[in-house]
Amino acid sequence: MAISPLELIRQATPGQRRTLLAAALGWALDAFDAMLYSLVLALLMRDLGMTKTVAGFLGTLTLLASGVGGMLFGFLADRIGRKQALMASILTYSVCSFASGLATSVAMLAAARFVLGLGMGGEWNTGATLVAESWPTEFRAKAIALVQSSWAPGFAVAALVAGPVAHYFGWRAVFFVGILPALVTLWMRRRVPESEMWQWQASRPETGSALEEKDPASIATIFRAPYVKYTFALLLFNFFLLFSWWGLFTWLPPYLALPVEQGGRGFGIMGMSTLMVLLNLFGMFPGYVSFGWVADYAGRRKAFFIYTFAASLLIPLYAAARSPIALLVLGAVVAFFGTGAFSGSGIMGSEIFPTAVRARALGFTYNGARMMSALAPLIIGRVGQAKGLGWAFYLCAAGYLLAALTTTQLPETKGKMLE
């Protein structure tokens, strides 16, 4: 159906608009808090005496925690409701972002980033599930794509904040700003409705929470026919996608900011922040939004292939670029395809799995993949230290290519009604 994003929002009910806004704000603020680390990484390495390997390890630690958090909050969302779990995840990552600014050692910073990762992992599947269950079939892909697109402005705002705040007040103040997302939960508690589909499911005596009390292993549903093949296909797809994205975008800010003699491009902290804002607004954001429309036109599986295959071809060109114009233009196109594919994970996962285990299924296939891909920042950091970050980005291109090949094992779920 040909419909613009604004028209889509106009046609929605007030409750649907609020669930969309809540999930989008949660994801944008997740991006804001999560990416502050990468944006001040060059300063952290200098002040705390971290090598690229140690810095990459902290990124890996956060991703490991996000995998645990996704499954933990997915369980909570299936038991206590989508909205409550979403609020808890936002509070978790906001408080721990503030705690990161209090760190006086690498160990303290690592502890704060680990707990932050728990909340970061929990936000994605709870928000995506809330929107999937609140919006009708014909608009579901577009609505989830809009939610996913909010990562880009969240990342862009983080870049806008990190540059000047770090320049004038230091990296600690940057992390202190990360407490602000906690205020969103005050609005959510009063104004955002719970998923009616979840409420109906939970109220049935033979399913929902009552069933789980009798069968705590009901999550095993996703490991049985007809779901098991698609569970692991989606898990692998997300793994290759996440490995590539975190490997590339964790190290892209320091790659741009570090001096040329250290393997960077010499833009400095302010120049890097400006470039990252432009990449988000003209690359990531339209990439995220466009995926929902492409998925409704060409199908979910074809859209996945188009975006991941294009990213695999473009990243080597970006790694070879030297001029600021080439880094901007190619960077925006890489960001468009390399991040746009993420909009499809929530769409397809929501359409594959039933309501009783949907949040946990998305938590396993997406955040389980996050845990598996947690070594990406560490691996890219070590390769970057040995051979240069530009060369290390070729590994990210290979990951996108593997993601494209994995799409052949995924189902086509376009037009499917939720169970």
Image (cartoon, rainbow, N blue to C red):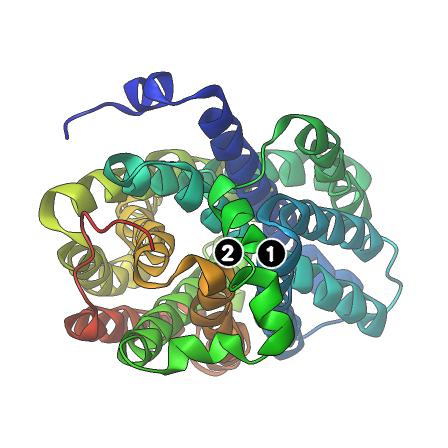
Location of the C terminus (image quadrant): bottom left
Q: Amino acid at mark 2?
A: Asn
Q: Which residue is mark 1?
A: 77
160, 400: nearer the viewer: 400
- Inspect this view and state whether residue 38 appears: no
Question: Which residue is nearer to you in this view: 375 or 89?
Answer: 89
* Residue name at image x 60 percent, y 58 percent: 122
Asked if residue 302 is positioned above or below residue 392 in the image, the reply reads above
Taking the view exactly as shown, the residue that stands out farthest to the front is: 205
Q: Left or right? Give the position of 65 relative to 177.
A: left
Q: Secondary structure at mark 1?
A: helix
Label of residue 171 in the image: none
Q: Which residue is mark 2?
A: 125
Q: Residue at x 27, y 41 (%)?
A: 137
Q: Is residue 175 above or below residue 234?
A: above
98 vs 265, left or right, is right
